[in-house]
Amino acid sequence: MSDVPARPDPLPADLPVAPPADLPVAQRAARPIPPPPGRPIPPPPGRSTLPPPPPGRPAVVVGKVVEVTVTAVHEREVEVRLADGRTGVVGRKEFESAPAVGAVVPAALLARDDPKGRVALSHEWARKQLLWDSMDAAKAEHTPLRGTLTSVVKGGAVVDLGLRAFLPASMVGEQPGADPLPLVGTEIDVMVLEVDRAKERLVVSRRDFLRRERRATERAAYSSLKVGADVPGTVVSVADFGAVVDLGGVRGLVHRSELTWGHLSAVEDVVSVGDVVTVKVLDVNRSKKKISLSLRQTQSDPLEGLEVGEVYDGAVTRVVEYGCFVKIEATGAEGLVHLTELTEVGGYRPDQLVSPGERVRVKVLAVDRSKRRVSLSARQAAY
């Protein structure tokens, strides 16, 4: 037997070989180590394992929202066809109802693998991103959105715009302290104030929408109002100085001097809140947003029908120290019968001769249309 040791069997060619000991550490780490026999070589870090698109067709970028066509609907998944011709898959639960084959739906490419080598997509994520895009556009273009006020929360309310939006309490109405509770379950129009996609924060305002609509209505109303025109309106408030009338978006004032041709004791004697009236436009000041109206000028002037020297039937409306006032039935004009024209006999007070409501015959002595005065005589009407 020879003293020479037996030669060892040669190593397999695919067995990993350790780097030489004399190599620097940095170079040792940089040398790749082959995988064990029978195992596929993994892709380099950061490279997608998705199947490549067919030659000549554009690839779909991860995260980009695209339109895909439904090709098959299964119990747990929906197969689709991408624009580049590849087959994709979307979870069935991401659809509220089963989509029809051939329908085009939005989807976004996900950075994950599918066991069957298909492109993994998300319809729900794509739909959400499209909604955020529409919120950004609405804010930039000042476009109003319509949604349902679903609930009242601390500090405001929640509005469903497809995304959850917060409506601050100060933004519910034009007037401070507006209560959002009566609006729950109703559709409202809002303006987008703040969009933060990263924090999923969306803030809206109903107040800004209402102001915008009111200003648009005011501009249209001021443009349509013509001085001298008769327009319909509704009395919304009364005060000692007159009545405020809503003309359908803008409001005007009927001064107490323009309420009636006759004597006015109180504004409430002529109009009340809620009355529908026809008024004449006297003046429109667009810069100061003031509209002057007249109620009496929509009616005939009772002085126009009076003839000096004519005798009329009337009724006593007021008794004063120096005489009484009589309203003429034929025209509605009211005039003064001085004490000296009540009777030829002296020594009597007016209240000893007539009383309110008493019917009398009077003669027209004078009519001053500029001062709105009518002089009457009871004693001369007797002749």
Image: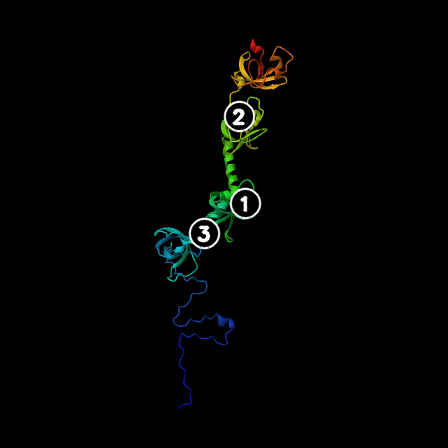
Locate residue 335, reporting x and y percent.
57, 17
Please tell me how crowded label 1 is: few (under 14), some (14-19), or many (20+) other residues with Cα within 10 Å.
many
Check disc 3: other Cα within 10 Å, few if <14, some if 14-19, many if 20+.
few
Q: Amino acid at mark 3?
A: Lys
Residue at point 53%, 24% (across, down): 296
Report which residue position mark 2 lands on: 295
Is disc 3 in contact with disc 2, using a CB cutoff of under 8 Å? no
Residue 143 appears in the picture as rendered: no
The location of residue 338, given as percent across then percent down, is 61, 15
Tag 3 residue:
128
Task: In the rendered view, tell whether residue 24 sits above or below residue 256.
Answer: below
Q: Which mark is residue 370?
A: none
Picture layout, residue 57 above or below residue 306:
below
Q: Cα distance, mark 2 to mark 1?
A: 40 Å
Q: Earlier in the sequence, mark 3 or mark 1?
A: 3
Q: Looking at the rendered structure, which numbered label has been put on residue 169? A: 1
